Amino acid sequence: MAQGPTNSHQALLRNRQYLEGRLLVLGLQDPDLLAGLPAGGLAMSEHQGVCQQARQMAPSSWQVAFGYNDPALQTARADTVVVFLPKARQELDLRLALARAALVDGGKVLVIGEKREGIAGAVKQLRSLDGAAVKLDSARHCQVWQARPAPAPFSLEEWLRWHRVEVAGTAVEVAGLPGIFSDGHLDEGTRLLLEALAARPLPGPVLDFACGAGTIGAWLAGHHGDNFLVDGIDVQAQAVFCARQTYQRQGVAGAIIAADGLPPDLGRYAAVVTNPPFHTGVRTDASMTTQFLQQVSRHLTASGELVLVANRFLPYPELIQSRFRAFEVLAEDSRFRVYRASGPRH
Ligand SMILES: C[S@@+](CC[C@H](N)C(=O)[O-])C[C@H]1O[C@@H](n2cnc3c(N)ncnc32)[C@H](O)[C@@H]1O
């Protein structure tokens, strides 16, 4: 969900005099920002919850795009593109490439980010596109930079890359994009989870909550064979795009759903498996997973089971035990534990 006014959004509002003509905003975090801008345009967020909120509350002069391949972006033309600094440095390259594709000749890009988010490094990335980039302001721990890079075409497919994951004799090809979780390698928590599932197969159909690039679902389908169905949910546009690519390459049966948490109209599964999120930005934040654990029973059959991997220090066991009749630790190492619970209390 939206996190309230960020420093970078406030730094943009201080500098709204530089916003000319039709606007494109890349990396919206707080939908409230749009009402404070001088003109309308198109705003992109890679977070499904932010997009949903922005669609409900933004002024009608604003259109909202979910992620880097939303069809609205293909025809977008902007005189000013605002680029908020993403967490991952390579995702900034992706945002700048998208900005260039939407820029009209002579248009400008404003890059805004906090010092602790790495604005100094971002300036180098910006200067590689326009050596004459200038700093317009420093405020709210942020810097605001302006550049006029040359327009260039953009295709998200060209940013895709693949890596191979093999666990317990089952191998899958996994898609990656800048900004996605565990890009280019298998996360150690996910590895422990898959090893545990190799020894203790799941009943289907399965939901992979917080599916990222679709590693778990593709591996489960490969391991079980015979059209084993694994649906996936993720909030991040790159994850949804990559998971669909991963499933397609492996011929996995299952839908990848873009959602912020568990949508209320989701059906019931024989098993839910997850390596859930525990960060908001750079801070540890277990609230998203706590909410998931409070709601997951509704989406399990009476004999359904939950398998969850998490850092050992995270306080999930008590909550899981309060929601399920049976509970065990399936596997553990020095950093992670795999919990299995069954018999949801509906
Ligand atoms: C720890 S990663 C696990 C990814 C994948 N399952 C794996 O093992 O490689 C957690 C994932 O949760 C997603 N996520 C974060 N908040 C979410 C939310 N509110 N609803 C759904 N997914 C969320 C992130 O985008 C990220 O892909």
Image (cartoon, rainbow, N blue to C red):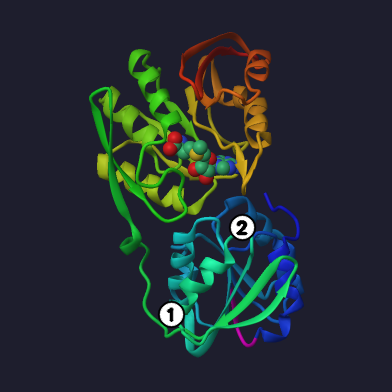
Residue 204 quadrant: top left
Residue occupying the far bottom of the picture: 106
- Describe residue 193's horizontal placement relative to residue 285 as left or right: left
Q: Is residue 37 above or below residue 300?
A: below
The type of residue carrying mark 2 is Cys
- Describe residue 130's horizontal placement relative to residue 313 as left or right: left
Work out how far the residue at label 1 is from the one at label 2, CA to CA, in angstroms: 29 Å
Q: Main secondary structure of the magenta part?
A: loop
Specify whether residue 160 is painted magenta. Answer: no
Q: Which residues are magenta?
A: 20-24
Residue 274: x, y in percent?
50, 29
Where does label 1 land, which residue? 129
Q: Residue at x 55, y 56 (%)?
A: 87
Looking at the rendered image, the disc whose residue lies closer to the viewer, 1 or 2, is: 1
Please, what secondary structure does the residue beneath circle 1 have?
Answer: loop
Residue 277: x, y in percent?
56, 37
Where does label 2 land, which residue? 51
Residue 202: x, y in percent?
40, 18
Q: Residues within 10 Å of mark 2 (few under 14, many from 20)?
A: many
Pick whichever of labels 1 and 2 is earlier in the sequence: 2
Q: Residue at x 72, y 65 (%)?
A: 141
Q: Is residue 32 above or below residue 37?
A: above
The type of residue carrying mark 1 is Leu
Q: Residue at x 45, y 29 (%)?
A: 189
